[in-house]
Amino acid sequence: MSADPTPAAPTTPAAPGKGFDLARLLAERGAERYELHARHLNHQLPRMLHTIGFDKVYERAEGAYFFDADGQDYLDMLAGFGVMGLGRHHPVVRQALHDVLDASLADLTRFDCQPLPGLLAEKLLSYAPHLDRVFFGNSGTEAVETALKFARYATGRPRVLYCAHAFHGLTTGSLSVNGEDGFRDGFAPLLPDTAVPMGDLAALERELKRGDVAGFVVEPIQGKGVHEAPPGFLRAAQELLHRHKALLIADEVQTGIGRTGDFFAYQHESGVEPDLVCVAKALSGGYVPVGATLGKDWIFKKVYSSMDRVLVHSASFGSNAQAMAAGLAVLSVLEDEHVVANARATGELLKSRLAALVGEYELLHEVRGRGLMIGIEFGKPKSLGLRSRWAMLQAARKGLFAQMVVVPLLQRHRILTQVSGDHLEVIKLIPPLTIGEREVDRFVEAFTAVMDDAHGGGGLMWDFGRTLVKQAVAGR
Protein backbone atom coordinates (compact mmCIF):
# COMPACT_ATOMS: atom_id res chain seq x y z
CA MET A 1 0.00 0.00 0.00
CA SER A 2 1.48 3.37 -1.02
CA ALA A 3 2.07 6.14 1.49
CA ASP A 4 -0.47 8.95 1.70
CA PRO A 5 1.11 11.92 -0.16
CA THR A 6 -1.02 14.47 1.69
CA PRO A 7 1.15 16.45 4.15
CA ALA A 8 0.10 16.30 7.78
CA ALA A 9 -1.47 19.41 9.25
CA PRO A 10 0.75 21.30 11.71
CA THR A 11 0.01 20.38 15.31
CA THR A 12 1.01 23.69 16.84
CA PRO A 13 -0.03 27.15 15.64
CA ALA A 14 2.56 29.63 14.47
CA ALA A 15 3.86 31.89 17.20
CA PRO A 16 2.11 35.27 17.39
CA GLY A 17 3.70 37.86 15.13
CA LYS A 18 5.48 35.27 13.01
CA GLY A 19 4.91 34.41 9.36
CA PHE A 20 4.11 36.56 6.35
CA ASP A 21 1.26 39.05 6.72
CA LEU A 22 0.94 41.31 3.68
CA ALA A 23 -1.65 43.65 5.17
CA ARG A 24 0.48 44.18 8.28
CA LEU A 25 3.62 44.73 6.22
CA LEU A 26 1.95 47.41 4.12
CA ALA A 27 0.43 49.06 7.18
CA GLU A 28 3.81 49.19 8.91
CA ARG A 29 6.05 50.10 5.97
CA GLY A 30 3.82 51.53 3.24
CA ALA A 31 4.59 55.12 4.17
CA GLU A 32 8.25 54.48 3.32
CA ARG A 33 7.48 53.85 -0.36
CA TYR A 34 9.46 56.77 -1.83
CA GLU A 35 12.33 56.38 0.60
CA LEU A 36 12.61 52.65 -0.19
CA HIS A 37 12.75 53.33 -3.91
CA ALA A 38 15.36 56.04 -3.46
CA ARG A 39 17.54 53.74 -1.36
CA HIS A 40 17.17 50.37 -3.11
CA LEU A 41 15.78 50.83 -6.64
CA ASN A 42 16.14 53.40 -9.44
CA HIS A 43 16.94 56.50 -7.36
CA GLN A 44 16.06 58.85 -10.21
CA LEU A 45 12.38 57.78 -10.23
CA PRO A 46 11.41 59.28 -6.85
CA ARG A 47 13.59 62.29 -7.60
CA MET A 48 11.69 62.91 -10.85
CA LEU A 49 8.29 62.37 -9.20
CA HIS A 50 9.12 64.81 -6.39
CA THR A 51 10.34 67.39 -8.93
CA ILE A 52 7.14 67.49 -10.99
CA GLY A 53 4.76 66.95 -8.10
CA PHE A 54 3.72 63.46 -9.11
CA ASP A 55 4.69 61.95 -5.75
CA LYS A 56 1.11 61.03 -4.86
CA VAL A 57 0.08 58.26 -2.51
CA TYR A 58 -2.64 56.17 -4.08
CA GLU A 59 -4.37 53.82 -1.66
CA ARG A 60 -6.43 51.72 -4.09
CA ALA A 61 -7.64 51.54 -7.68
CA GLU A 62 -10.70 50.38 -9.57
CA GLY A 63 -11.47 50.52 -13.28
CA ALA A 64 -10.19 53.80 -14.72
CA TYR A 65 -9.64 55.47 -11.33
CA PHE A 66 -7.14 55.70 -8.47
CA PHE A 67 -8.17 56.79 -4.98
CA ASP A 68 -6.10 58.52 -2.30
CA ALA A 69 -6.43 58.24 1.47
CA ASP A 70 -9.08 60.99 1.48
CA GLY A 71 -11.21 59.11 -1.05
CA GLN A 72 -10.52 61.55 -3.89
CA ASP A 73 -10.57 59.93 -7.31
CA TYR A 74 -7.94 60.37 -10.03
CA LEU A 75 -8.79 59.59 -13.65
CA ASP A 76 -6.20 57.32 -15.25
CA MET A 77 -5.54 58.29 -18.89
CA LEU A 78 -2.27 56.33 -18.94
CA ALA A 79 -3.37 52.75 -18.10
CA GLY A 80 0.09 51.75 -16.89
CA PHE A 81 1.58 52.53 -20.34
CA GLY A 82 -1.25 50.47 -21.88
CA VAL A 83 -1.06 47.44 -19.60
CA MET A 84 -4.42 48.14 -17.93
CA GLY A 85 -6.57 47.80 -21.02
CA LEU A 86 -9.54 46.65 -18.95
CA GLY A 87 -8.79 49.08 -16.16
CA ARG A 88 -7.68 47.94 -12.74
CA HIS A 89 -9.03 44.87 -10.97
CA HIS A 90 -11.59 43.71 -13.49
CA PRO A 91 -13.75 41.18 -11.60
CA VAL A 92 -13.66 38.53 -14.35
CA VAL A 93 -9.85 38.55 -14.51
CA ARG A 94 -9.60 38.57 -10.71
CA GLN A 95 -11.89 35.57 -10.48
CA ALA A 96 -9.94 33.69 -13.15
CA LEU A 97 -6.76 34.11 -11.12
CA HIS A 98 -8.47 32.97 -7.93
CA ASP A 99 -9.77 29.94 -9.81
CA VAL A 100 -6.43 28.96 -11.32
CA LEU A 101 -4.69 29.26 -7.94
CA ASP A 102 -7.40 27.20 -6.26
CA ALA A 103 -7.06 24.51 -8.96
CA SER A 104 -3.50 23.67 -7.76
CA LEU A 105 -2.46 22.75 -11.31
CA ALA A 106 0.76 20.88 -12.04
CA ASP A 107 2.22 23.98 -13.65
CA LEU A 108 5.60 24.41 -15.40
CA THR A 109 6.62 20.75 -15.14
CA ARG A 110 8.50 21.26 -18.43
CA PHE A 111 7.69 17.69 -19.43
CA ASP A 112 3.98 17.75 -20.14
CA CYS A 113 1.52 19.83 -22.17
CA GLN A 114 -0.97 21.73 -20.04
CA PRO A 115 -4.28 22.80 -21.67
CA LEU A 116 -4.29 26.54 -20.89
CA PRO A 117 -1.41 27.57 -23.25
CA GLY A 118 -3.01 25.72 -26.12
CA LEU A 119 -6.40 27.24 -25.41
CA LEU A 120 -5.00 30.79 -25.22
CA ALA A 121 -2.97 30.28 -28.41
CA GLU A 122 -6.07 28.97 -30.20
CA LYS A 123 -8.09 32.00 -29.08
CA LEU A 124 -5.39 34.53 -30.01
CA LEU A 125 -4.96 33.01 -33.45
CA SER A 126 -8.69 33.33 -34.10
CA TYR A 127 -8.09 37.10 -34.30
CA ALA A 128 -5.29 36.59 -36.87
CA PRO A 129 -6.51 33.66 -39.00
CA HIS A 130 -3.58 33.89 -41.43
CA LEU A 131 -1.20 32.92 -38.60
CA ASP A 132 -0.72 29.44 -37.16
CA ARG A 133 1.40 29.25 -34.00
CA VAL A 134 2.25 31.17 -30.82
CA PHE A 135 5.27 31.45 -28.55
CA PHE A 136 4.52 32.71 -25.03
CA GLY A 137 7.06 34.76 -23.07
CA ASN A 138 6.64 37.30 -20.30
CA SER A 139 6.74 40.80 -21.78
CA GLY A 140 6.61 42.94 -24.89
CA THR A 141 10.36 43.11 -25.28
CA GLU A 142 10.53 39.29 -25.07
CA ALA A 143 7.89 39.06 -27.79
CA VAL A 144 10.04 41.30 -30.00
CA GLU A 145 13.21 39.35 -29.16
CA THR A 146 11.42 36.18 -30.24
CA ALA A 147 10.36 37.75 -33.53
CA LEU A 148 13.91 38.98 -34.24
CA LYS A 149 15.41 35.54 -33.56
CA PHE A 150 12.75 33.71 -35.57
CA ALA A 151 13.05 36.09 -38.54
CA ARG A 152 16.83 35.76 -38.64
CA TYR A 153 16.78 31.98 -38.35
CA ALA A 154 13.93 31.43 -40.80
CA THR A 155 15.47 33.60 -43.51
CA GLY A 156 19.14 32.93 -42.77
CA ARG A 157 19.83 36.67 -42.88
CA PRO A 158 21.31 38.95 -40.21
CA ARG A 159 19.65 42.37 -40.53
CA VAL A 160 16.26 43.64 -39.38
CA LEU A 161 14.99 47.05 -40.50
CA TYR A 162 13.00 49.35 -38.23
CA CYS A 163 11.57 52.87 -38.28
CA ALA A 164 13.14 56.05 -36.98
CA HIS A 165 11.63 56.96 -33.58
CA ALA A 166 10.37 53.41 -33.02
CA PHE A 167 10.15 51.83 -29.59
CA HIS A 168 10.28 48.03 -29.43
CA GLY A 169 11.73 47.41 -25.97
CA LEU A 170 14.93 47.84 -24.00
CA THR A 171 16.64 44.44 -23.92
CA THR A 172 19.67 44.23 -26.21
CA GLY A 173 17.98 42.75 -29.27
CA SER A 174 14.92 44.99 -29.13
CA LEU A 175 17.15 47.96 -28.30
CA SER A 176 18.90 47.32 -31.62
CA VAL A 177 15.62 48.20 -33.36
CA ASN A 178 14.82 51.13 -31.07
CA GLY A 179 14.75 54.35 -33.05
CA GLU A 180 15.72 56.69 -30.23
CA ASP A 181 19.38 57.48 -29.52
CA GLY A 182 18.57 58.38 -25.91
CA PHE A 183 17.76 54.76 -25.15
CA ARG A 184 20.67 53.35 -27.19
CA ASP A 185 23.48 55.63 -25.99
CA GLY A 186 26.12 53.79 -23.99
CA PHE A 187 24.87 50.28 -24.75
CA ALA A 188 26.77 49.61 -27.99
CA PRO A 189 27.66 47.42 -29.76
CA LEU A 190 24.15 46.38 -30.76
CA LEU A 191 22.91 44.14 -33.54
CA PRO A 192 23.54 45.26 -37.15
CA ASP A 193 20.07 46.66 -37.80
CA THR A 194 19.12 49.73 -39.83
CA ALA A 195 16.51 52.49 -39.44
CA VAL A 196 14.34 53.80 -42.26
CA PRO A 197 11.89 56.71 -42.05
CA MET A 198 8.28 55.73 -41.40
CA GLY A 199 6.45 55.72 -44.72
CA ASP A 200 9.58 55.86 -46.91
CA LEU A 201 9.18 52.96 -49.33
CA ALA A 202 12.19 54.02 -51.41
CA ALA A 203 14.49 53.82 -48.37
CA LEU A 204 13.01 50.44 -47.47
CA GLU A 205 13.60 49.10 -50.97
CA ARG A 206 17.20 50.37 -51.04
CA GLU A 207 17.99 48.36 -47.91
CA LEU A 208 16.16 45.27 -49.18
CA LYS A 209 18.20 45.28 -52.40
CA ARG A 210 21.32 44.55 -50.35
CA GLY A 211 19.98 41.03 -49.91
CA ASP A 212 20.80 40.61 -46.21
CA VAL A 213 17.51 41.73 -44.63
CA ALA A 214 15.59 39.20 -42.54
CA GLY A 215 12.61 41.43 -41.86
CA PHE A 216 11.10 44.81 -41.09
CA VAL A 217 9.62 45.44 -37.63
CA VAL A 218 7.08 48.23 -37.39
CA GLU A 219 4.50 49.67 -35.00
CA PRO A 220 1.33 50.41 -37.02
CA ILE A 221 1.06 53.48 -34.81
CA GLN A 222 4.26 54.58 -33.12
CA GLY A 223 3.96 55.02 -29.39
CA LYS A 224 6.50 57.85 -29.41
CA GLY A 225 4.58 60.85 -30.70
CA VAL A 226 1.56 58.78 -31.81
CA HIS A 227 2.46 58.71 -35.50
CA GLU A 228 0.40 56.40 -37.70
CA ALA A 229 1.85 54.59 -40.70
CA PRO A 230 0.75 56.48 -43.84
CA PRO A 231 -2.22 54.97 -45.72
CA GLY A 232 -1.07 52.10 -47.92
CA PHE A 233 2.42 51.93 -46.43
CA LEU A 234 2.08 48.63 -44.58
CA ARG A 235 0.56 46.86 -47.59
CA ALA A 236 3.22 48.21 -49.95
CA ALA A 237 5.99 47.38 -47.46
CA GLN A 238 4.67 43.83 -47.17
CA GLU A 239 4.76 43.38 -50.94
CA LEU A 240 8.34 44.73 -51.11
CA LEU A 241 9.49 42.51 -48.26
CA HIS A 242 8.00 39.35 -49.71
CA ARG A 243 9.44 40.15 -53.14
CA HIS A 244 12.87 40.24 -51.46
CA LYS A 245 12.14 37.14 -49.32
CA ALA A 246 12.02 39.11 -46.06
CA LEU A 247 9.36 39.16 -43.32
CA LEU A 248 6.93 41.77 -42.04
CA ILE A 249 6.90 41.92 -38.23
CA ALA A 250 4.06 43.91 -36.63
CA ASP A 251 4.81 45.15 -33.11
CA GLU A 252 1.33 45.30 -31.57
CA VAL A 253 2.55 45.34 -27.97
CA GLN A 254 0.83 48.67 -27.33
CA THR A 255 -1.52 48.95 -30.31
CA GLY A 256 -2.96 45.42 -30.10
CA ILE A 257 -5.75 43.85 -28.01
CA GLY A 258 -8.29 46.46 -29.10
CA ARG A 259 -6.37 49.66 -28.34
CA THR A 260 -6.97 51.32 -31.73
CA GLY A 261 -10.56 50.18 -32.31
CA ASP A 262 -9.73 46.90 -34.07
CA PHE A 263 -8.21 43.87 -32.36
CA PHE A 264 -4.88 44.55 -34.13
CA ALA A 265 -3.93 47.96 -35.53
CA TYR A 266 -2.58 46.47 -38.79
CA GLN A 267 -6.16 45.39 -39.54
CA HIS A 268 -7.09 49.01 -40.31
CA GLU A 269 -5.39 48.51 -43.67
CA SER A 270 -6.87 45.93 -46.03
CA GLY A 271 -4.62 43.11 -47.22
CA VAL A 272 -1.96 43.43 -44.53
CA GLU A 273 -1.02 40.02 -43.12
CA PRO A 274 2.23 40.20 -41.10
CA ASP A 275 4.44 37.12 -40.91
CA LEU A 276 5.03 37.67 -37.18
CA VAL A 277 2.95 39.67 -34.67
CA CYS A 278 4.09 40.70 -31.18
CA VAL A 279 1.56 41.27 -28.39
CA ALA A 280 1.74 41.81 -24.60
CA LYS A 281 0.62 44.57 -22.18
CA ALA A 282 -3.22 44.45 -22.13
CA LEU A 283 -3.26 40.67 -22.64
CA SER A 284 -2.13 40.39 -19.01
CA GLY A 285 -5.24 41.98 -17.56
CA GLY A 286 -2.79 44.04 -15.53
CA TYR A 287 -1.95 41.15 -13.22
CA VAL A 288 0.48 38.56 -14.56
CA PRO A 289 3.06 39.56 -17.21
CA VAL A 290 2.57 37.80 -20.53
CA GLY A 291 3.97 38.32 -24.02
CA ALA A 292 3.15 36.43 -27.19
CA THR A 293 4.66 36.13 -30.65
CA LEU A 294 2.24 34.89 -33.30
CA GLY A 295 3.67 33.56 -36.52
CA LYS A 296 3.30 31.44 -39.62
CA ASP A 297 3.67 27.69 -39.44
CA TRP A 298 6.72 27.49 -41.71
CA ILE A 299 8.66 29.94 -39.55
CA PHE A 300 8.06 27.95 -36.36
CA LYS A 301 8.82 24.67 -38.10
CA LYS A 302 12.12 26.05 -39.35
CA VAL A 303 13.15 27.22 -35.86
CA TYR A 304 11.97 24.03 -34.14
CA SER A 305 13.17 21.78 -36.96
CA SER A 306 13.98 18.66 -34.92
CA MET A 307 13.64 17.17 -31.44
CA ASP A 308 17.22 18.29 -30.82
CA ARG A 309 16.01 21.89 -31.20
CA VAL A 310 12.88 21.53 -29.05
CA LEU A 311 14.19 24.05 -26.47
CA VAL A 312 16.23 26.24 -28.82
CA HIS A 313 14.01 29.17 -27.80
CA SER A 314 12.11 29.09 -24.51
CA ALA A 315 11.22 31.12 -21.41
CA SER A 316 11.32 29.86 -17.84
CA PHE A 317 7.98 31.38 -16.88
CA GLY A 318 6.46 31.36 -20.36
CA SER A 319 3.01 29.71 -20.60
CA ASN A 320 2.56 29.68 -16.81
CA ALA A 321 -0.98 28.92 -15.72
CA GLN A 322 -1.67 32.28 -14.06
CA ALA A 323 -0.66 34.24 -17.17
CA MET A 324 -2.62 31.95 -19.47
CA ALA A 325 -5.74 32.20 -17.29
CA ALA A 326 -5.44 35.99 -17.23
CA GLY A 327 -5.08 36.11 -21.03
CA LEU A 328 -8.11 33.88 -21.59
CA ALA A 329 -10.17 35.99 -19.17
CA VAL A 330 -9.13 39.22 -20.92
CA LEU A 331 -10.18 37.91 -24.34
CA SER A 332 -13.48 36.72 -22.90
CA VAL A 333 -14.19 40.17 -21.42
CA LEU A 334 -13.25 41.85 -24.70
CA GLU A 335 -15.97 39.88 -26.47
CA ASP A 336 -18.62 39.78 -23.74
CA GLU A 337 -18.43 43.50 -22.97
CA HIS A 338 -17.81 44.70 -26.56
CA VAL A 339 -14.64 46.43 -25.42
CA VAL A 340 -13.07 46.86 -28.88
CA ALA A 341 -16.20 48.57 -30.21
CA ASN A 342 -16.22 50.82 -27.14
CA ALA A 343 -12.58 51.77 -27.75
CA ARG A 344 -13.46 52.74 -31.31
CA ALA A 345 -16.56 54.77 -30.43
CA THR A 346 -15.16 56.45 -27.31
CA GLY A 347 -11.89 57.17 -29.08
CA GLU A 348 -13.71 58.85 -31.95
CA LEU A 349 -15.69 60.97 -29.47
CA LEU A 350 -12.59 62.01 -27.51
CA LYS A 351 -10.53 62.75 -30.61
CA SER A 352 -13.27 64.79 -32.28
CA ARG A 353 -13.89 66.90 -29.19
CA LEU A 354 -10.19 67.60 -28.76
CA ALA A 355 -9.71 68.31 -32.47
CA ALA A 356 -12.47 70.92 -32.24
CA LEU A 357 -10.25 72.87 -29.84
CA VAL A 358 -7.34 73.23 -32.29
CA GLY A 359 -8.76 76.39 -33.84
CA GLU A 360 -9.43 77.93 -30.43
CA TYR A 361 -5.93 77.69 -28.94
CA GLU A 362 -2.85 78.82 -30.82
CA LEU A 363 -0.57 76.63 -28.71
CA LEU A 364 -2.56 73.54 -29.73
CA HIS A 365 -1.17 72.24 -33.03
CA GLU A 366 -2.76 68.85 -33.83
CA VAL A 367 -4.81 65.96 -32.44
CA ARG A 368 -4.19 62.55 -34.03
CA GLY A 369 -4.45 58.81 -33.43
CA ARG A 370 -6.90 55.95 -33.61
CA GLY A 371 -9.29 54.49 -31.09
CA LEU A 372 -8.04 55.15 -27.57
CA MET A 373 -4.48 55.94 -28.61
CA ILE A 374 -4.46 59.71 -29.10
CA GLY A 375 -1.67 62.24 -29.41
CA ILE A 376 -2.11 65.94 -28.59
CA GLU A 377 0.70 68.03 -30.11
CA PHE A 378 1.56 71.59 -29.13
CA GLY A 379 3.34 74.09 -31.38
CA LYS A 380 4.73 77.59 -31.70
CA PRO A 381 2.06 80.25 -31.12
CA LYS A 382 1.55 83.36 -33.26
CA SER A 383 0.98 86.10 -30.69
CA LEU A 384 4.06 87.94 -29.48
CA GLY A 385 3.61 87.39 -25.73
CA LEU A 386 3.06 83.66 -26.03
CA ARG A 387 5.82 83.35 -28.61
CA SER A 388 8.40 84.76 -26.19
CA ARG A 389 7.34 82.37 -23.44
CA TRP A 390 7.38 79.44 -25.88
CA ALA A 391 10.88 80.43 -27.02
CA MET A 392 12.07 80.53 -23.39
CA LEU A 393 10.92 76.95 -22.88
CA GLN A 394 12.30 75.67 -26.18
CA ALA A 395 15.69 77.24 -25.52
CA ALA A 396 15.94 75.39 -22.21
CA ARG A 397 14.63 72.01 -23.37
CA LYS A 398 12.11 70.86 -25.93
CA GLY A 399 9.15 69.14 -24.31
CA LEU A 400 8.77 71.46 -21.33
CA PHE A 401 5.46 72.91 -22.47
CA ALA A 402 3.87 69.45 -22.71
CA GLN A 403 5.15 68.81 -19.18
CA MET A 404 3.56 72.09 -18.11
CA VAL A 405 0.21 70.71 -19.30
CA VAL A 406 0.60 67.27 -17.75
CA VAL A 407 1.37 68.64 -14.27
CA PRO A 408 -1.78 70.81 -13.75
CA LEU A 409 -3.93 68.04 -15.23
CA LEU A 410 -2.85 65.94 -12.26
CA GLN A 411 -2.41 68.62 -9.59
CA ARG A 412 -5.60 70.59 -10.23
CA HIS A 413 -7.87 68.16 -12.04
CA ARG A 414 -6.67 64.77 -10.74
CA ILE A 415 -6.05 63.32 -14.21
CA LEU A 416 -2.93 61.24 -14.89
CA THR A 417 -1.36 61.61 -18.37
CA GLN A 418 2.13 61.40 -19.87
CA VAL A 419 4.42 63.28 -22.24
CA SER A 420 4.83 61.02 -25.27
CA GLY A 421 8.61 60.73 -25.29
CA ASP A 422 11.65 62.79 -24.46
CA HIS A 423 12.01 66.16 -26.22
CA LEU A 424 8.46 65.97 -27.62
CA GLU A 425 5.69 68.54 -27.27
CA VAL A 426 3.10 65.75 -27.38
CA ILE A 427 0.82 64.29 -24.73
CA LYS A 428 -0.27 60.69 -25.31
CA LEU A 429 -3.63 59.42 -24.08
CA ILE A 430 -3.88 55.64 -23.69
CA PRO A 431 -6.63 55.19 -21.08
CA PRO A 432 -8.37 51.92 -20.18
CA LEU A 433 -10.48 50.73 -23.11
CA THR A 434 -13.52 50.69 -20.84
CA ILE A 435 -13.88 54.46 -20.37
CA GLY A 436 -16.99 56.21 -21.67
CA GLU A 437 -18.60 59.59 -22.18
CA ARG A 438 -18.27 60.57 -18.50
CA GLU A 439 -14.48 60.25 -18.66
CA VAL A 440 -14.35 62.05 -22.02
CA ASP A 441 -16.30 64.96 -20.53
CA ARG A 442 -14.02 65.14 -17.51
CA PHE A 443 -10.84 65.10 -19.56
CA VAL A 444 -11.98 67.64 -22.16
CA GLU A 445 -13.22 70.05 -19.48
CA ALA A 446 -9.95 69.80 -17.57
CA PHE A 447 -7.82 70.11 -20.70
CA THR A 448 -9.81 73.19 -21.77
CA ALA A 449 -9.22 74.80 -18.37
CA VAL A 450 -5.47 74.15 -18.64
CA MET A 451 -5.38 75.61 -22.16
CA ASP A 452 -7.26 78.69 -20.95
CA ASP A 453 -4.65 79.14 -18.23
CA ALA A 454 -1.76 78.67 -20.65
CA HIS A 455 -3.14 81.24 -23.08
CA GLY A 456 -3.78 83.70 -20.24
CA GLY A 457 -0.04 84.30 -20.23
CA GLY A 458 0.55 84.35 -16.48
CA GLY A 459 -0.35 82.58 -13.29
CA LEU A 460 0.85 79.38 -11.70
CA MET A 461 1.27 77.45 -14.94
CA TRP A 462 3.94 79.76 -16.37
CA ASP A 463 5.54 80.10 -12.93
CA PHE A 464 5.95 76.34 -13.02
CA GLY A 465 7.34 76.68 -16.54
CA ARG A 466 10.06 79.00 -15.28
CA THR A 467 10.89 76.43 -12.57
CA LEU A 468 11.23 73.74 -15.25
CA VAL A 469 13.51 76.01 -17.27
CA LYS A 470 15.82 76.54 -14.27
CA GLN A 471 15.98 72.80 -13.63
CA ALA A 472 16.64 72.04 -17.31
CA VAL A 473 19.48 74.56 -17.47
CA ALA A 474 20.97 73.34 -14.18
CA GLY A 475 20.87 69.76 -15.42
CA ARG A 476 22.99 70.44 -18.51
Image (cartoon, rainbow, N blue to C red):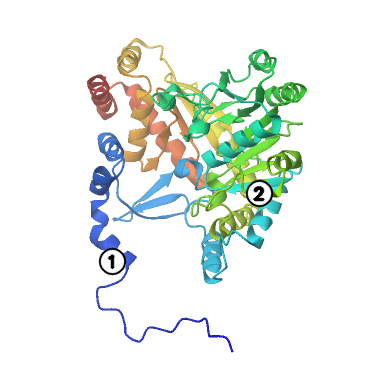
Local secondary structure at mark 1: helix
Q: Residue visible at 62% across and 30% down?
A: 220
* Amino acid type of the residue tagged 2 in the rendering: Val
The reply to whether residue 433 is visible in this rendering is no
Task: Give the left or right position of residue 434, taking residue 470 as reference.
Answer: right
Residue for badge 1: 24
Q: Residue visible at 52% across and 81% down?
A: 5
* 20, above or below 428, in the image: below
Q: How many marks?
A: 2
Q: In the picture provided, is 385 more to the left or to the right than 302?
A: left
Q: In the rendered view of the protein, which quadrant contains the C terminus?
A: top left
In the image, which is nearer the foreground, mark 1 or mark 2?
2
Residue plotted at (41% across, 11% down): 382
Residue 50 in percent (x, y) is at 25, 38
- Give the mark nearest the N terminus, 1 or 2: 1
Which x, y percent locates residue 371?
A: 59, 37
Disc 2 packing (10 Å; few <14; some 14–19; many ≥20): few
From the image, tell me which residue sits under label 2.
310
Residue 408 visible in the picture: yes
Frontmost residue, 282 versus 465: 282
Residue lying at the far top in this picture: please name it. Answer: 384
Give neighbour class at mark 1: few <14, some 14-19, many 20+ (Cα, 10 Å). few
Location of residue 39 (image quadrant): top left
User: In which quadrant is the N terminus drawn?
Assistant: bottom right
Q: Is residue 208 above or below residue 38?
A: above
Residue 402 is tagged as none
Mark pair 1, 2: CA separation: 45 Å
